[in-house]
Image: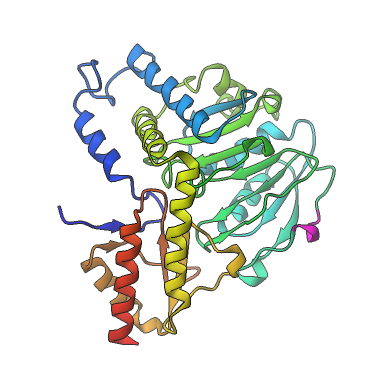
């Protein structure tokens, strides 16, 4: 197989070493005499796997003991509902930051459960900048404050953590495991797996224990965090293969130096690509430099008519899934943990050659 680099926003590239490990274990997991996809989630083999994967994630993120770690289904989008269901706790209002496509979806779902106070809104600048936190209008009567640290589509990323006298909720789908964070600053962290954790189908939720156990009435039992926590995420059959693969990714991240090591690697990758864009008259990035994402890098060509040719030649060069989201246009390189520096270097080299030929 020829070397190719997958810049997809998700489902995204997985570490090659992990894919090879999965390939080697696919027919028989450990001593189970069956594939990990075929064994019972309540058997000793899978229970051991599940316990280790949770501990590895706790080690990586330094998760305090008063937080539950849940391995759920439904994608991060299911948490748009589960967060208000579990965190309103008798109140009828919540604060939301509107900073992009995914926070907009979270807001729309929360409005089904409560009054939503939009404490900051950057839709007018097409999600290319973030207002200073001192200008946010936070309602003190809100049950919680929700924000999206990294907006995958716009390539917009917070460089600060909002602080308010209420639980902070973060959709970290596209930034989790990319660097060190202080989990204790959050009430709930949730993330779809298909960017930095593993294959699609798994959602990781990290929730402080005092926020579990008081849900909006008449909601599905599976939407209650206490149902999931009291049954170790196995009230019903979990996404076993995705959970297993995530565990292998956690082991790989540990081998890269943990989140401190990943942070250094990811910062260097992002700097390499942004430098190439900024030092060119042919490419541009629309996001305010202070809030440029480490994980998702949109860029525009000087002539939109060349977009098709760029994508065609990039694919031929083994550079995959670079088409930008329709709402932004141009290109987007998603450079999650699994993307090696060699992939960034290959992209930058290709961009330079394409500019010489077409600029």
At 44% from the left edge and 41% from the top edge, which residue is drawn?
193
Q: Quadrant of residue 323?
A: bottom left
Depth check: 276 or 245 in front?
276
Q: How is the image coloured?
A: rainbow
Horizontal placement of 261 versus 323: left or right? right
User: Above or below — where is 244 with respect to 285?
Assistant: above
Q: Which residues are magenta?
A: 133-137
The x and y percentages for residue 271 are 47, 64
Question: Does residue 169 show up magenta in the picture?
Answer: no
At 16% from the left edge and 56% from the top edge, which residue is drawn?
2
The x and y percentages for residue 343 are 31, 59
Quarter the C terminus occupies: bottom left
Q: Quadrant of residue 16?
A: top left
Horizontal placement of 142 versus 253: left or right? right
User: Above or below — where is 290 with respect to 95?
Assistant: below
Residue 53 visible in this rendered orientation of the protein? yes
Q: Quadrant of residue 245?
A: top left
């Amino acid at each position: 197989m020829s070397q190719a680099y997958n810049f997809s926003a998700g489902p995204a590239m997985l570490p090659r070493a992990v894919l090879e490990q999965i390939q080697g274990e696919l027919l028989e997991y450990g001593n189970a005499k069956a594939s990990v996809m075929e064994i019972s989630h309540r058997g000793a083999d899978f229970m051991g796997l599940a316990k280790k994967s949770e501990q590895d994630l706790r080690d990586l993120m330094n998760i305090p003991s008063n937080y539950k770690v849940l391995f759920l289904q439904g994608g991060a989008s299911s948490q748009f509902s589960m967060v208000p269901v579990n965190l309103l706790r008798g109140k009828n209002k919540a604060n939301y930051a509107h900073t992009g496509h995914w926070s907009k979806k979270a807001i729309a779902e929360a409005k089904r459960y409560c009054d939503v106070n939009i404490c900051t809104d950057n839709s007018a600048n097409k999600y290319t900048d973030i207002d200073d936190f001192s200008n946010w209008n936070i309602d003190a009567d809100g049950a919680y404050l929700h924000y999206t640290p990294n907006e995958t589509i716009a390539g917009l990323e917070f460089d600060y953590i909002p602080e308010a006298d209420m639980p902070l909720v973060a959709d970290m789908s596209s930034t989790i495991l990319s660097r060190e964070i202080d989990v204790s600053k959050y009430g709930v962290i949730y993330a779809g797996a298909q960017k930095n954790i593993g294959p699609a189908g798994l959602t990781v939720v990290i929730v402080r224990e005092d926020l579990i156990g008081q849900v909006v009435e008449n909601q599905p039992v599976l939407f209650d965090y206490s149902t999931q926590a009291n049954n170790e995420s196995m009230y019903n059959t979990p996404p076993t293969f995705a959970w297993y693969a995530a565990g292998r990714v956690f082991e790989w991240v540990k081998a890269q130096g943990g989140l401190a090591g990943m942070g250094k690697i990811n910062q260097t990758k992002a700097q390499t690509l942004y430098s190439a864009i900024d030092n060119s008259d042919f490419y541009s990035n629309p996001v305010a430099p202070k809030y440029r994402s480490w994980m998702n890098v949109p860029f525009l060509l000087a002539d939109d008519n060349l977009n098709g040719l760029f994508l065609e030649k990039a694919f031929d060069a083994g550079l995959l899934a670079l088409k930008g989201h329709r709402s932004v246009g141009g290109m987007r390189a998603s450079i999650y943990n699994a993307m090696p520096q060699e992939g960034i270097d290959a992209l930058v080299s290709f961009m330079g050659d394409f500019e010489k030929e077409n600029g």
